Amino acid sequence: MNFQQEVQISLTVLITGLVVVFLMLIFLTLVIKGYGKAVNSLQSKLNQRPRESMPVPKPEPVPAAAPAPSEPAAEEAPAVEEGISEEILAVLAAAAYSMIPGGVVTSVRRAAVQSRARSSWGMAGLLENTRPF
Amino acid sequence: MTIFSGFLKSVMKLFETSGLVGNDPRNYVMILIAGVLIYLAVKKQFEPLLLLPIAFGMLLVNLYPAIMAAPTDTENGGLFYYLYLGVKLGIYPPLIFLGIGAMTDFGPLISNPKSFLLGAAAQLGIFTTFIGAIFLGFETRQAGSIAIIGGADGPTAIFVTSQLAPKLLGPIAVAAYSYMALVPIIQPPIMKALTTKKERLVRMEQLRPVSKLEKILFPIIVTILISLLLPDAAPLVGMLMLGNLFRESGVVDRISKTAQNELMNIITIFLGTTVGATATGSLFLSWGTIKIVILGLLAFCIGTAGGVLFGKLMCRLSGYKVNPLIGSAGVSAVPMAARVSQKVGQEEDPGNFLLMHAMGPNVAGVIGSAVAAGVLLSILK
């Protein structure tokens, strides 16, 4: 092969190879994005349907004999913008647990401080995705 | 006396047929090289799953060349001749890909399909190395086989080489697997040289969750598209996606486990030993091998650089939402290259977890290198 032929074949393979690989993978990118959106919108529609088909419970009629006490207008709902504290969360969890048949709450204690090490779930995920071939 | 002379004749005949007399002196050098590779595999743990069988196959063939002999009218062929048919006929690499597909989670790629572009950019090493190989005097099919080392994918390199230049299988396989083991050493300096500190500190958004349906559709769609558009890549990509479908469907757990474990292990043994057994002294000890080793390194480096540079482009275009370090994971050394991206990123910012982001380009690189292999086969075969 002379120099000119070498240059010709080299550039042919370089340009063809890069163009074909990029075009194929760009096409795959678009297809995967497209079907991802289609699948997600289909699944969100399917998830909404059971909620819509559930019968909305009718509000109970307010008894006329017992007038509802009027609340002071100035009183506002408790602010939750700052978040619910851990203690309240623990109490709610304990209350929910006690409603389960057989559920008995004996005490509510603060858990031990977790070490900085990765949780076992995180470790399992890391190992799953990084084990060698 | 007759018995004694008969005894002497038998002993002489045994000696004359032994490897000590008939062996090419270059084979003894190969025996030493096999010893070094065994040391690297066992002691330094350089890709031992492949390097150990390759090294031992190399050792065996240089001690007893007839182990690879073809059958004649009067005698059967050697053991490795028959096992090697799986390589020659392109059977083993697709079966390895079946196992790889069964082990791979394409979730990070599906949730961020732009990773495909990084996988494509990292294949730059293949096509630029082709140019280098041509100008170093290799003919086109040999140059294509050498260039595929840049895909950083052992089965793909073996698949392409077995079809384009089977005589170079030994040095190319040894070069490919050695460089794959050296990814943690080769890549970081290139990654740091091509990125700024600001770019390395980029934290990426959490990946969106991927549904099971998406994961099941992915292998089917990829198989259909690539097989229709580039049929030469169909054996590799098809088997990769079949393995992945076994994994994601959840209904063939037994087959999936077999593909990931027993099948992979059996094929790895056969593939490794027979590929190693092609490395005889006469083929391996030549200037061509040295050129292959240099070109292989060039391919890896350019592939890494291509991925990182495209990552930089994506970083700038997205307004610093993409960390360019994940571009280096576009070489398909799974999961080593993704781990390297994670490690280099964490050197700058210990709280920056790039691993799952890098897995996207890493697995995209497997598909990208298979597509590149299909392109080379369709142009050069």
Image (tube, coloured by chain):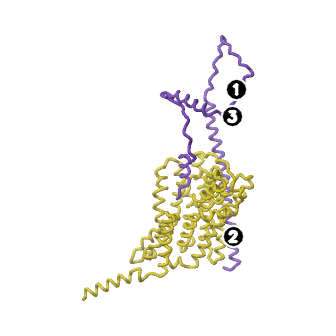
- Toward the viewer: B89 or B272? B272
Is residue B162 among the parts visible in the rendering?
A: no
Residue indicated by mark 3: A82
In the figure, B130 relative to A97: above or below?
A: below
Do tags 2 and 3 sit on the same chain?
A: yes
Instruction: Please state which of the two labelled residues, at mark 1 or mark 3, is closer to the viewer.
Output: 3
Spot occupied by residue B16 in the image (x, y as percentages of width and height): 38, 84
Spot occupied by residue B29 in the image (x, y as percentages of width and height): 49, 78
Sequence order check, earlier mark of 2 and 3:
2
Give, as a three-letter code, the residue at label 1. Answer: Ala
Residue indicated by mark 1: A77
Q: Quadrant of residue B81?
A: bottom left
Spot occupied by residue B190 in the image (x, y as percentages of width and height): 66, 64
Chain painted in yellow in the figure: B
- Which residue does the image show at 54% across and 74% down from the upper left? B167
Q: How far is the residue under mark 2 from the one under mark 3?
A: 63 Å
Q: Describe the element under mark 2 as helix, strand or loop.
A: helix
Q: Describe the element under mark 1 as helix, strand or loop.
A: loop
Chain painted in purple in the figure: A
Chain ID of residue with mark 2: A
- Toward the viewer: B38 or B220? B38
Residue indicated by mark 2: A12
Do tags 2 and 1 sit on the same chain?
A: yes
